[in-house]
């Protein structure tokens, strides 16, 4: 069951769902809550011709954070008029908002794009929309421009929405994955 704006506001008031900073009224639609883009994004580095790197997630020593740090740079997009995302380019972003889904509240969420941006070709997640019950942290976005023209990404722009869903039961434990309490 998807929560409506009324139920989302009740959950925020009762601290069943925590979103900080507190969302403004214009962040709510009938069944979702808009989130904004943080000032920092991660851009991927490119190897010069003739050098090949391969990522092996099946390796016993594979650690996502180590790999991500070695192949990306952090860019502050608040100090410029924004970041120009060219077609077919992937960057990683964050939501400005911190989200806490209490695992015993029977609520999970999905991060989805905004239709006004999707119709330009902007995708905010590739295959990872689930925000598990018990998640705490800012939401990591996999942003790619699949459109024909560059798109300007600006700090504070409404970039995605959360759709909150009531789970059938309470999980045995909250989210314990590698991205718990992610912030950078």
Image (cartoon, rainbow, N blue to C red):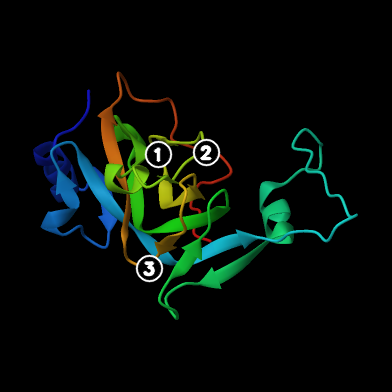
The answer to which of 90 and 130 lies nearer the viewer is 90
Left or right of 12 on screen, residue 78 = right
Q: Position of residue 5 (x, y in %)?
A: 13, 40
Residue to which mark 1 is pinned? 134
Q: CA distance from mark 1 to mark 2?
A: 8 Å
Q: Dot 2, how many residues are within 10 Å of its Cα: few (below 14), some (14-19), or many (20+)?
A: few
Badge 1 element: loop
Disc 2: which residue: 176
The answer to whether marks 1 and 3 mark residues whose Cβ atoms lie closer than 8 Å is: no
Q: Nearer the viewer, residue 102 or 144?
A: 144
Residue 140, percent from left and from top:
48, 50
Q: Which one is nearer the viewer's eye here, 142 or 104?
A: 142
> 143 left or right of 22?
right
Q: Earlier in the sequence, mark 3 or mark 2?
A: 3
Q: Tell me the distance, in whole angstroms, between the alpha carbons under discs 3 and 2.
A: 29 Å
Asked if marks 1 and 2 touch (Cβ < 8 Å), the reply is: yes
Task: Write the residue at 22% across / 40% down.
Answer: 32
Between the C-alphas of marks 1 and 3, the distance is 27 Å
Q: Given this view, does label 3 or label 2 mark the residue nearer the observer? A: 3
- Residue at the disc numbered 3: 155
Q: 10 Å neighbourhood of mark 1: few (<14), some, or many (≥20)?
A: many
Please give the name of the residue rendered at 23% of the width and 46% of the height, measured from the top-left corner.
33
Secondary structure at numbered mark 3: loop
């Amino acid at each position: 069951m998807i929560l409506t704006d009324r139920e989302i506001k009740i959950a925020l008031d009762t601290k069943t769902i925590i979103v900080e900073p507190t969302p403004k009224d214009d962040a709510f639609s009938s069944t979702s809550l808009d989130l904004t883009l943080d000032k920092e994004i991660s851009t991927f580095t490119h190897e010069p011709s003739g050098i090949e790197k391969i990522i092996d997630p099946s390796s016993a020593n594979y650690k996502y954070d180590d790999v991500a740090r070695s192949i990306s740079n952090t860019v502050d997009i608040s100090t410029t008029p924004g970041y120009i995302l060219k077609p077919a380019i992937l960057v990683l972003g964050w939501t400005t908002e911190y989200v806490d889904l209490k695992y015993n509240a029977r609520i999970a969420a999905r991060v989805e794009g905004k239709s006004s941006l999707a119709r330009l070709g902007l995708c905010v997640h590739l295959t990872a929309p689930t925000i598990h019950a018990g998640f705490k942290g800012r939401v990591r976005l996999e942003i790619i421009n699949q459109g024909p023209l560059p798109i300007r990404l600006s700090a504070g722009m409404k970039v995605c929405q959360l759709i909150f869903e009531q789970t059938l039961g309470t999980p045995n434990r909250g989210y314990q994955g590698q991205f718990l309490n992610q912030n950078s």
